[in-house]
């Protein structure tokens, strides 16, 4: 009887435990399936702070006067404005015809498109008003050509926000939190509003990362991935032609993608994760598998997309840099075929059979069969240019890099990365430690579970063992008092205990595989970029997006440390936004816009009037009815006008101890040889004096962050301060007081 009662009690307890587990499991499933019910009423329930950050991004990104680095101008708008507006500009070494290291397609995209829109609007205005090219209403000026590319880049930057939403919704995470961190970062406010090649590289890394992270879901649903495969190849090509360093960030993504394809072709995927993600019962019970043929096709489409896009870049670059010229092509082709007896490749025939026979005989034609590989390679080498290869070879030469500055190999890790992402670098190291701990703990738990399963023979014990699944697993661990439950899945962690009033709390975390992937992108990029002796902070810009995804959750823990971290994040980004957005070299672009509108444009207008008066006087002198006195007066007037023309036509603009001034903001026509700009950079005061003394018969404008120019003696010249631009800071030549935080403009004239 005692044994019978004990068995009954045990059965009652077991049934109660099963009922409790069933109820808890159903409740947990309801939480999982209805996790986003609050979001269904509003697709984008974004906080007010995000809308404020959008407003800041537009205002600061477009109107900021700060000057980060010369490449933001000289690798894009300085190039495209030359042929879009026929401006007199400076061509940097990267776009040298002899050895071009930058593709012209990238500047055609980030500044060429907005310039084309601006030029089209001007034509529309001219057409509506009917004033022609000399119409007094002109929207093409220093301000508009400065802001147009920035507006375009700010709009493009919102693709990062969209990627955040896609990725977080795919893994059932709160995109509101990640968007708050992304949009408040100074990198997206300042860097992503500028026309850097690094900005394009960063956008392409984020695009590729998003596609790869969504790729697994497409496979699990059995969807066709061929369009995405083709797009991946195109994106990789665009990234490499933007900057060859793109391959460092894309390598972990490529390895992960190959792993997904291999895994999908060797294993059958049960679509339980789609139930959690989409609450779509139509996929219930289905088992999908991507065939090996489909995987081979996917890889082939990636390669095909890469080759097509690369061919486009190569052809456009070769045409722009004068490699692919039709006269040169004919000459090279004739030199190759000069020793080959070449009958007509196609003979005129109306017979379909004859045409088919002619096509089949093309490989046997002397023009084809007598060509050797050396001739073909020589032909391709002489008529095509490959800018990523040229850039890579250039950067392999340390002597070339010494012209741009040699840095310690640890500069990226200890200086540049902290300056770019601030507190995120600490969170990155914490995340790496967390991943290592979880991996070690998972291995240890797996070993202990295997030992327990081999030692326990009871069915009840077997039912309580943990069932782990990499793609979609729900683990329920009951304590002896049933006061703690936890659910771990690939999308996060839900915990409940008796201290939380039976409320489920979801922990924001990506699956361990995705976290490892994000860490790999950061480590790969940082490691390979650190191998180069020349290291600049902007090279690390592509790490910004994966680092945000990896670490944003640490800002929203219900702890004081998270609040302090959030305050530190806001202060850090405010300081960097103000410094690089408004103070650093802040007087250079406003001074150029000022000179273009207040000095050069009125000067050109005056010269136009002088030229018209000279032409009118010449026409009057040809009139036989004018007496001799009038003729003498007109001749004297002509001489005076000619002297005024010669004197006022020469302007020399000099920049001293500033970054390189972008010439396109002045709006000087390409064939204008009377207006010149001299960049003295960081030369000493004696070089400045000798340059001023050598200039004769020209109006001289000098822009410098120091007033030392006023206290120097010059030959037959006097200088005076005429204007200043606030704020401006040249870190290499800091001001002596806050009041001198300016870029001063001096005018020197002959005595």
Image (spheres, rainbow, N blue to C red):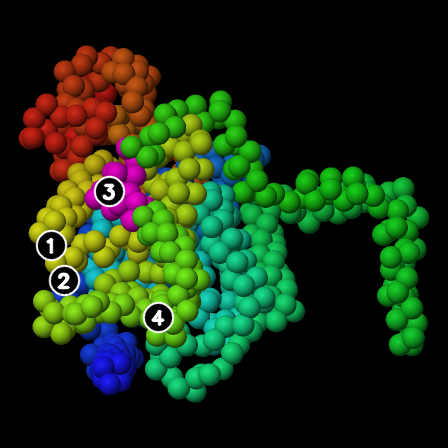
Q: How many marks?
A: 4
Q: In this view, does 348 lie above or below 637?
A: below
Q: Mark 2 points at which residue?
A: 49
Apparent side of residue 523 relative to residue 394 in the rendered image (left or right): left
Of the residues under marks 3 and 2, which one precedes in the sequence?
2
Residue 655 or 23: which is nearer the viewer?
A: 23
Of the residues under marks 3 and 4, which one precedes in the sequence?
3
* Snapshot quadrant of residue 585: top left
Which SS class for mark 4? helix
As drawn, the label of residue 738 is none
For the record, the magenta segment spans 415-434
Of the residues under marks 1 and 3, which one precedes in the sequence?
3
Of the residues under marks 4 and 1, which one precedes in the sequence?
4
Q: Residue at x 60, y 52 (%)?
A: 315
Q: Name the residue under label 4.
A: 461
Of the residues under marks 2 and 1, which one precedes in the sequence?
2
Local crowd size for mark 3, using a 10 Å CA cut-off: few (<14), some (14–19), many (≥20)? few
Where residue 440 sits in the image (x, y, percent)?
36, 49
Give the number of the mark in front: 3 or 4.
Answer: 4
Q: Name the residue under label 3.
A: 426
Q: Name the residue under label 1.
A: 559
Apparent side of residue 530 relative to residue 507 in the rendered image (left or right): right
Which SS class for mark 2? helix
């Amino acid at each position: 009887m005692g044994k019978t009662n004990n068995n009954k009690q045990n059965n009652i307890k077991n049934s109660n435990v099963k009922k409790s587990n069933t109820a808890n499991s159903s409740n947990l499933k309801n939480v999982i399936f209805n996790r986003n019910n609050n979001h269904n009423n509003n697709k984008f329930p974004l906080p007010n702070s995000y809308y404020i950050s959008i407003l800041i991004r537009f205002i600061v990104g477009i109107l900021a006067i700060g000057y980060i680095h010369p490449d933001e101008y000289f690798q894009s708008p300085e190039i495209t404005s030359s042929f879009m507006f026929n401006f007199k500009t400076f061509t940097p070494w990267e776009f040298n015809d002899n050895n071009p290291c930058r593709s012209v397609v990238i500047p055609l995209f980030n500044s060429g498109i907005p310039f084309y829109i601006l030029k089209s609007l001007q034509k529309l205005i001219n057409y509506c008003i009917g004033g022609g090219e000399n119409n007094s209403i002109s929207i093409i000026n220093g301000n508009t050509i400065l802001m147009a590319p920035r507006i375009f880049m700010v709009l493009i930057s919102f693709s990062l926000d969209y990627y955040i939403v896609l990725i977080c919704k795919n893994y059932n995470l709160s995109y509101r939190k990640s968007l708050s961190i992304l949009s408040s970062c100074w990198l997206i406010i300042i860097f992503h509003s500028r026309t850097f090649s690094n900005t394009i590289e960063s956008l392409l890394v984020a695009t590729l990362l998003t596609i790869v992270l969504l790729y697994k879901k497409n496979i699990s649903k059995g969807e066709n991935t061929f369009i995405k495969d083709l797009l991946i190849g195109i994106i990789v090509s665009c990234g490499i032609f933007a900057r060859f360093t793109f391959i460092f960030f894309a390598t972990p993504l490529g390895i992960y993608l190959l792993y997904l394809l291999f895994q999908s072709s060797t294993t059958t995927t049960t679509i339980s994760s789609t139930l959690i993600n989409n609450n779509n019962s139509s996929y219930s019970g289905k088992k999908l598998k991507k065939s090996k043929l489909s995987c081979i096709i996917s890889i082939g489409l990636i390669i095909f997309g890469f080759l097509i896009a690369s061919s486009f870049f190569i052809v456009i670059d070769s045409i722009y840099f004068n490699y692919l010229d039709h006269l040169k092509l004919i000459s090279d082709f004739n030199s190759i075929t000069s020793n080959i007896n070449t009958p007509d490749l196609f003979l005129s025939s109306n017979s379909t059979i004859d045409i088919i026979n002619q096509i089949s005989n093309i490989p046997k034609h002397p023009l084809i069969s007598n060509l050797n590989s050396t001739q073909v390679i020589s032909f391709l080498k002489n008529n095509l240019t490959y800018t990523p290869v040229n850039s890579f070879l250039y950067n392999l030469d340390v002597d070339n890099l010494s012209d741009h500055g040699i840095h310690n190999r640890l500069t990226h890790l200890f200086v540049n990365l902290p300056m770019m992402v601030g507190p995120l670098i600490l969170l990155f190291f914490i995340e790496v430690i967390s991943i290592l701990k979880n991996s070690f703990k998972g291995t240890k738990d797996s070993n202990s579970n295997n030992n327990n399963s081999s030692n326990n023979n009871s069915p009840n014990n077997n039912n309580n063992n943990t069932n782990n699944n990499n793609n979609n697993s729900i683990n329920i661990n009951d304590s002896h008092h049933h006061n703690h439950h936890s659910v771990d899945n690939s999308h996060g962690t839900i915990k409940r205990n008796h201290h939380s009033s039976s409320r489920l709390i979801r922990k924001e975390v990506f699956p361990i595989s995705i976290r490892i992937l994000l860490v790999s992108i950061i480590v790969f990029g940082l490691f390979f970029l650190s191998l180069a002796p020349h290291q600049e902070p902007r090279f690390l810009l592509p790490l910004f997006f994966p680092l945000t995804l990896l670490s944003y959750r640490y800002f929203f823990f219900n702890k004081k440390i998270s609040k302090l971290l959030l305050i530190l994040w806001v202060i850090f980004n405010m300081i960097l936004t103000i410094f690089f957005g408004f103070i650093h070299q802040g007087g250079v672009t406003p001074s150029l816009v000022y000179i273009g509108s207040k000095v050069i444009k009125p000067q050109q207008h005056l010269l136009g009037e002088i030229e018209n008066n000279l032409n009118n006087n010449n026409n009057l002198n040809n009139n036989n009815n004018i007496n001799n006195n009038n003729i003498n007066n007109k001749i004297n007037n002509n001489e005076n006008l000619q002297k005024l023309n010669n004197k006022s036509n020469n302007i020399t603009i000099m920049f001293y101890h500033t970054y390189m001034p972008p010439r396109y903001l002045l709006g000087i026509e390409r064939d204008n040889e009377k207006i010149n700009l001299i960049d003295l950079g960081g030369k000493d005061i004696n070089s400045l004096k000798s340059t001023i003394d050598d200039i004769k018969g020209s109006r001289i404008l000098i822009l410098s962050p120091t007033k030392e120019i006023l206290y120097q003696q010059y030959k037959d010249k006097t200088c005076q301060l005429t204007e200043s631009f606030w704020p401006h800071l040249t870190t290499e030549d800091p001001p002596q007081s806050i009041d001198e935080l300016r870029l001063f403009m001096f005018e020197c004239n002959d005595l």
